[in-house]
């Protein structure tokens, strides 16, 4: 019997959106699934050697804020200069204090577990990115590459 398959599409490039595809991918691989993650548009940031992922509370009303700020601080206030950086530092500190693995650690787990990470060639070309900007082991392919695997997968998720 062949292994179950999980196909993921990762489209977001913020710190909080980097976690779902990497956690699901590494967990599924640990459970014996054959896993492919197709990174497209802003999700490509997760594959870069020099990641500079930030948290963006703007447009994310479900994000809990420190000191109850989500109750009294206007949503527009998170657009003030420096807020994104401050929130990113706070989120990383909270994750570290709670023992949450870093994005780099999860990405390494995926690589060790043979999760196939595919960078969307069209998006790489669109944003004038160079293959040398990405971590080793990344493959490049188009939608047809993803669809071939996704069409045979037991689980398909768009993140």
Image (tube, grey):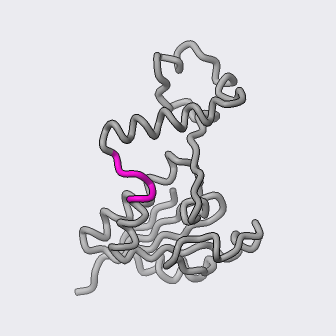
Quarter-of-image position of residue 121: bottom right
Q: Residue furthest top?
A: 72
Q: Is residue 29 magenta?
A: no
Q: Is residue 1 left or right of residue 39?
A: left
Q: Residue furthest bottom?
A: 1
The magenta region covers 100-105
Please report the residue visible at 64 percent of the width from the left and 70 percent of the height from the top. 133
Vertical placement of residue 97 versus 42, above or below: above
Please report the residue visible at 33 percent of the width from the left and 36 percent of the height from the top. 97
Question: Whole-percent x and y of residue 116?
Answer: 45, 77
Quarter-of-image position of residue 49: bottom right
Please report the residue visible at 63 percent of the width from the left and 73 percent of the height from the top. 120
Foreground of the two, 117 or 130: 130
Quarter-of-image position of residue 134: bottom right
Vertical placement of residue 28 versus 80, above or below: below
Question: Whole-percent x and y of residue 56?
Answer: 60, 38
Indicate the quadrant containing the N terminus: top left, top right, bottom left or bottom right: bottom left
Q: Is residue 140 left or right of residue 155?
A: right
Please report the residue visible at 49 percent of the width from the left and 25 percent of the height from the top. 65
Foreground of the two, 145 or 126: 126
Question: Whole-percent x and y of residue 130?
Answer: 70, 74
Q: Is residue 91 left or right of residue 109?
A: right
How many numbered discs, if any? 0
Question: Whole-percent x and y of residue 123?
Answer: 70, 69
């Amino acid at each position: 019997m062949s292994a179950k398959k999980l196909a993921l599409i990762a489209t977001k490039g913020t710190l909080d959106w980097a976690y779902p595809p990497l956690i699901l991918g590494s967990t599924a691989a640990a459970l014996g699934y054959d896993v492919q993650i197709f990174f497209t548009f802003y999700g490509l940031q997760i594959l870069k050697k020099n990641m500079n992922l930030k948290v963006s509370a703007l447009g994310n009303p479900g994000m809990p804020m420190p000191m109850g700020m989500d109750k009294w601080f206007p949503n527009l206030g998170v657009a003030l200069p420096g807020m994104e950086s401050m929130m990113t530092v706070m989120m990383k500190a909270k994750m570290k204090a709670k023992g949450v693995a870093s994005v780099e650690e999860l990405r390494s787990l995926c690589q060790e577990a043979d999760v196939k990470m595919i960078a969307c060639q069209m998006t790489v070309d669109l944003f004038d990115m160079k293959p040398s900007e990405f971590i080793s082991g990344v493959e490049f392919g188009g939608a047809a590459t993803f669809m071939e695997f996704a069409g045979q997968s037991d689980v398909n998720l768009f993140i």
